[in-house]
Amino acid sequence: MPIISAFCKKGGVGKTTFLGYLAHYHATQGKTVLVISADDQNSIFKIFGVDNFVNDRDDDFFEHLLVGEKQPQDITFEARINMYLMKTLNTDRLSLNLTLKRSEEKHLRQIIESFNQYFDYIFIDFPPSSSRLSEILLDISQSILIVVGLDTLGLQGFSNTIQYFVDTDIDLAKIKYVVPVGYIKGRRAPIKCLKDLKDQAKMLTPNAIITTPVKDKAEIKNIQTEGISIFDNQPMKDRFHQKNFDEIKKDLISIFKEINLD
């Protein structure tokens, strides 16, 4: 059961979107996948139009599983066929508890490992901030994807991410892929940032593969407001939007095929 994490010490780069679509793609390929939101904003739910699950009840969060009040099936939400989500309530408090009670770390690791009997892949979505919870979940991940925005702040986020890994003794070899996002053909700034990113990655993460850049497409934001995934069989309202939708899907599938999860 591979555990795949998407991380970056910079918010707003499209990390949650990329991870969510990667998970949904594999679900459409017949794999049973789980996405754990380690970000208590639980944005992954909104992307798939199931954010009602976040606030419907207050006793079905990941924390309730940790303290033994719930079973995995009680806190698992089916967002799409073969694709399930788990939400967190207060990651700051959870991280504090993990810091003060070291036995809780072993318990957390055992729970994640127990998901092996239910899922083919586990994906973990993180906030840009750091915490003890993030450190543990990154440590138990087999593959980490660093999602980097192709602008000056995005490159700084990449550097900050690597420094965070060094400071917390997270194995840099776990970074299997660096995913550039926000590429615009013919635009000088993202082209230069992509070159700079490749130079930085070659020095800082020499074993990581830099994927084909994800193109900047406003259409993604539009369909997310409607809770539609790019891998839903959902016809768009007109030919123009359908063409953009199909192009995004084609590009993402091509990139996803570059990423070996096993």
Image (tube, rainbow, N blue to C red):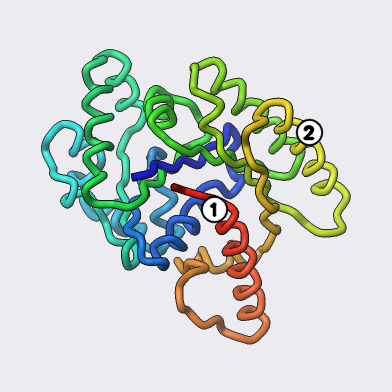
The image quarter containing residue 237 is bottom right
Check disc 2 and give the amino acid type.
Asp
Query: Which residue is outermost to the bottom?
Result: 239
| Residue located 57% across and 64% down the image | 253
Identify the mark nearer the N-term, 1 or 2: 1
Compare residues 218 and 84 and report the one nearer the observer.
Answer: 84
Quadrant assignment for the N terminus: top left
As measured in the structure, the alpha-carbon distance from the residue carrying label 1 to the one carrying label 2 is: 23 Å
- Expressed as whole percent of the image width and height from the top left, the position of residue 33 reads 35, 55
Q: Is residue 221 left or right of residue 79?
A: right
| Residue located 44% across and 50% down the image | 43
Q: Residue beneath label 2, please?
A: 199
Q: Is residue 9 left or right of residue 22?
A: right
Compare residues 54 and 239 and report the one nearer the observer.
Answer: 239
Q: Which mark is residue 188?
A: none
Closer to the camera: disc 1 or disc 2? 2
Task: Give SS at disc 2.
Answer: helix
The image quarter containing residue 154 is top right
- Expressed as whole percent of the image width and height from the top left, the position of residue 112 reads 27, 37
Check disc 1 and give the amino acid type.
Phe
- Expressed as whole percent of the image width and height from the top left, the position of residue 239 reads 64, 86
Instruction: Classify 155 as above or below 130.
Output: below
Q: Residue beneath label 1, please?
A: 18
Q: Is residue 186 left or right of residue 108?
A: right
| Residue located 17% across and 52% down the image | 73
The image quarter containing residue 51 is bottom left
